[in-house]
Image (cartoon, helix red, strand yellow):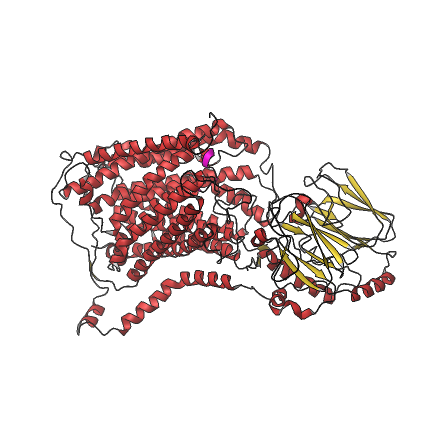
Amino acid sequence: MVFVDSYPKTSKLVRSEFLVSFIALGIGALFGVIQALHRTGVFRGFVSSADYYTILTGHGVLLALVFTTFFIAGLFTWAVANSLERELPQRIAWSAFWIMLTGTVLAAVSIIGGIVGSPSILGHDLEADVLFTFYAPMKAHPAFYIGAALIIVGSWVAGLAYFKSLWDWRSENPGERIPLQTFMVLTTMLMWYVSTIGVAVEVVAFLIPWSLGLIQNVDPLLTRTLFWYFGHPVVYFWLMPAYLVWYTILPKLAGGRLFSDPLARVVFVAFLLLSTPVGFHHQYTDPGIPSGYKFIAMTNTMFLLLPSLLTAFTVVASVEHGARQRGAKGYLSWLRNLPWGKPAFAGCMLAGLMFAAGGFSGMINAGMNINYLIHNTIWVPGHFHLTVGTAFALTAMAISYWLVPQITGKKLKQRSLASVQPYVWFVGMAIMSNAMHRAGLAGIPRRTAEPTYDEFAFEGVAGTVGEMRIQIAIGGFLLFVGAAMFLIVMADTLLARRGGTLSVNSNIPEPLSGADHSPRILDNYKLWTAIALLLIVIAYGPPLASMVADGLFAPGSPPIPV
Amino acid sequence: MALSRRQFVGAAAGTAALAATGTATAQDEPDYGGWFDDVSNYDGTVDKRGQDTVTITVGAQGNNGAFAFDPPAVMVSPGTEVVWEWNGEGGGHNVVSDGDGPLDSGDPVSEAGTTYSHTFESEGMFKYVCVPHEALGMKGAVVVRPGDGGGSSGDGGSGGQQQQGPPENPDYGGWFDDVSNYDGTTVDRTDADSVEITVGAQGNNGAFAFDPPAVRVTPGTEVTWSWTGEGGGHNVVSDGDGPLNSGDPVSEAGTTYSHTFEEMGVYKYVCTPHASLGMKGAVVVGGPLDGGSGGSGGGSGQEGSGIELSGPQWLLSGSVLLAFFSPLLFAAAMRRRQTGRPPQTGSGGELRRATGPEPVEEAAETEPAVELGHDEYDPKGTAALVAFYFVLIGLLWVFMYFVEFLGRVSIIG
């Protein structure tokens, strides 16, 4: 039975969440191509160089916060209902949706305000040119911070709906192991609860009162630290849903079975433990944080490579199992026996391949010494366009080709367009990200509308700066085309008539190594959360205490107009 | 050209100021040309004429903190000594004239009890700022006018002088929209025979400004542009056809370029390399000028009646809205296509209506060609790929480590 018929209410919720995320993707992609053309100097007619930063903020917030959070909410809603075989508690889940949507509208309107001349709303200029990282003392309209807080609070409420489902399921199935998909969802949400405390404190205790004028000064270092307490784990909040797809759905798309269920659980527990106490690796150049704590953060970050490498092994082995079941032989020739023409499979695989490259540049970022080579250069956006911009985004688009038919009961339309789309994205990203990495090595800064300076010329180690600019512009344009292709397929599918035989099959075969063989302690959420909190206290306790010791708002900075 | 938000706020506030002068304000309130628009504690000019010494507090409450002068605007008689007294709040402050002017207390200091004084001998308006907090609105002005505090007799005279002069704010037709250090005032230097403009002053997010950006001179005045040496190479070139052309950009401090303006008119000019950053200026020669010359486009911006969008902004806002509503438009198109199509079969429609939503089935599960269980499966291909990945990472690490040595002169040779 198709998901939409088994769980009609939950299907409607997933559809709504996906719709918001797709709209955010469309606007965010438009902002993206404007930036790519502007900062490379190919075409600067869309916005002035001052408004570039508004567009940059919109791109970051709409894609990294809105598109991701709504898509993840939809995917998790589906995964919990699918694996626990029950409708989600509707009232909680829908209030989560409306809270997040309200937050999104508030944040988006304040950002767009910056383009249309910052009209004064409630005594403050309606603008939020503070970039995705919204560092103090750059200040946005209070509505932006309230919107961001509501998106986070909404995601907490959504998590409550998943936990409520588990508790209900538990009372009916005492003693059973938590199904893998639900286990992954809940581990991710626990990690999310622990890590969003930082940004919640930053926004609610400091930035909202400050932007309203209730307090005069905030401590920029303290608020930055609280941001990065959240700012690194958030990338795992994007990544773990992609892992959920790669572990539980991709093997089936390849024609095989998941290699090991216990290994997948170990990986997710490792993320819960290690995701948060690493934020200082974004602040290697920040003064006021002792090097020792930066070093601890680096060590923890390097440990985080472990679950990702375990994932690479498990997922590739599961896909290889699919190829072998299709009759493949040989060491490498099995790669040919895979359904590369199916968009869901091809998209996930290309996303995973890009993530391997992203993992490499991530190791450079995390290395305390070598980080200085590329800190705040365009290398960094080059890196996270491989991770969140491809590992997550392309996986999300790919799995939509498989999931949307199930939650709508409609056949996937424009299938030839869909099968080309992941390759367009992959090629565009390969061109753009490669050039961005090389430009970063040449020292070209990130977050800059016109990165050219008088009497100074950047020199590339490999290739010329002009060639890199052209590649960034071409790559960015291809990505925009890729996003547009995806949205056309989705719009055509969502508006089609329901009925008939779908192109997809929802059955997920049992793993080769099932949960029965794994130690029960893996499912002990209390234990893992306690250890995670302990690690955070070790990594963050003393430096935060020293920042607070000289006064919560000192050394303070009043808002700097942007 | 984009309408910056500063411009928008400026236009709106300007309208408010215009309305205020039109209705309530007495004749003797000087026209500061928008100088106090962003100063929260400004509430009219305090008339202290007739006193020998006048004290202004530095670091008074205002502008969201201790970032204000109190009183911000004060009117004194010629010969008065004005004393600025620091109260020690709000960090380091100083008192520096806006543009050319007599006031300069030096580097910011924060100690309470610090004082700085200046005796104003000549009549005029002296605007000043606290440099570190200017952007927050820490600005003030001293107006020197004869009189004794009652002030009505002197005002008639000054009002008469004003009438001879040109309009206070020439219409530049949006020329200064993206110039950050243009605060809506045209600095009046009609009293001087030679006028100096700084090239490479702070502004437009760097040393990319002319200071003052807009200046009014009498015909026959020699205007000299003087380079600060900051912000790289600059030049002075007329916008369109015009007399100004200092040649290729130069960056040396102390460079000067001068031009004597004989003909009345508005002379707009730019620094060619930094024009896009807002490094633009204008010299207004003579007056009063024909009010219509600036064009009506800028005039409507001054009304501040609503949000003004330029062409590219319309394009952008339009695309955003279109993107937002594209699913709905698409829906409408698809719905049309659906309704335009004749019913597919004779009997289908009614039957489906009676049985609820259309039945949906999944694709059949594809059966594996070879069933491989837990014990038969040996992931040797994965092992090969993992090995390949480790080799690749090793090579990339080596490459990264030696990028410095390959590409540049390294520390060790």
Left or right side of A545 for A517: left
Q: Quadrant of residue B406?
A: top left
- From the viewer's perspective, tell me whether residue B80 is left or right of residue A197: right
For the residue pair B156 and B387, the one nearer the viewer reads as: B387
Please state, as top left, top right, bottom left or bottom right, where the N terminus of chain B lies in the image. Answer: bottom right
Q: Which residues are magenta?
A: A372-378
Q: Residue at x 33, y 33 (%)?
A: B393
Q: Give the residue at the far front of this rendering.
A: B247
In the picture as drawn, the residue positioned furthest to the top comes out as: B412
Image position, residue B259 (x, y; %): 71, 56
Give the vertical position of A429 relative to A550 (above or below).
below
* Residue sitting nearer the eye, B41 or A427: A427
**Residue A167, visible in the rendered structure:** no
In the image, farthest residue toward the left: B370
Residue B371 at x, y percent in the picture? 12, 41
Image side of residue A451 versus residue A184, left or right:
right
User: Is residue A376 one of those drawn in magenta?
Assistant: yes
Q: Is residue B42 magenta?
A: no
Question: x, y (%) of residue A123?
Answer: 60, 56
| Residue A33 position (above or below residue A361) | below
Please tell me how many numbered marks the rendered image carries: 0
The picture quadrant where one finds residue B108 is top right
Residue at 25% x, 73% y is B341
- Say whether residue B111 is visible: yes
Q: Position of residue B240 (x, y in %)?
A: 60, 62
Task: Pick whichever, B158 or A105, lies toward us.
Answer: B158
